[in-house]
Image: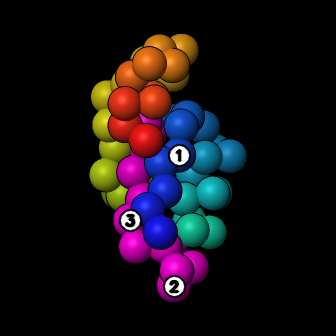
Amino acid sequence: MKVLIVGSGAREHAIVRALMRDENVTGIECAPGNAGIAADVTTLPLDVTDTQAIAALA
């Protein structure tokens, strides 16, 4: 399963870390993410209020 996390805070970082341990997760991307998240997964430059852009990524 591929997962898109939307956000850039500590909560999203914790979710990323938890998903990294799940063997059913094959890919994780985070938009927009932060420097800490970028060390673990691919981050995407995205305005979190742009719902059309988020839907296009999903």
Judging from the image, what secondary structure is the residue with disc 3 in? Answer: strand
Task: Give the CA separation, mark 2 to mark 1.
Answer: 17 Å
Does the magenta-highlighted stretch encompass residue 35? yes
Position above or below: 8 against 19: above
Measured as percent of width and height from the top left, residue 2 is found at 44, 62
The magenta stretch spans which residues? 20-36
Would you name the residue on which mark 1 appears? 5
How far, Cα to Cα, is label 3 from label 2?
A: 10 Å
Choose between 47 and 56: the one closer to the eye: 56
Q: Residue at x 44, y 18 (%)?
A: 52
Disc 1 packing (10 Å; few <14; some 14–19; many ≥20)? some
Residue type indicated by callout 1: Ile
Could you give the CA–CA distance between mark 3 and mark 1, rounded to whole angstroms? 11 Å
Badge 2 amino acid: Glu
Q: Residues within 10 Å of mark 3 (few under 14, many from 20)?
A: few
Q: Secondary structure at mark 2?
A: loop
Q: Residue at x 34, y 43 (%)?
A: 43
Q: How is the image coloured?
A: rainbow
- Does residue 43 sit above or below 51 in this rendering? below
On the image, numbered disc 3 is attached to which residue?
27
Q: For the point 37% across and 37% down, which residue is it?
A: 57
Does the stretch in magenta take in 10? no
Q: Position of residue 10 (x, y in %)?
A: 63, 44
Residue 36 in sight:
no
Residue 41, visible in the rendered structure: yes
Q: Amino acid at mark 3?
A: Gly
| Numbered label attached to residue 23 | 2
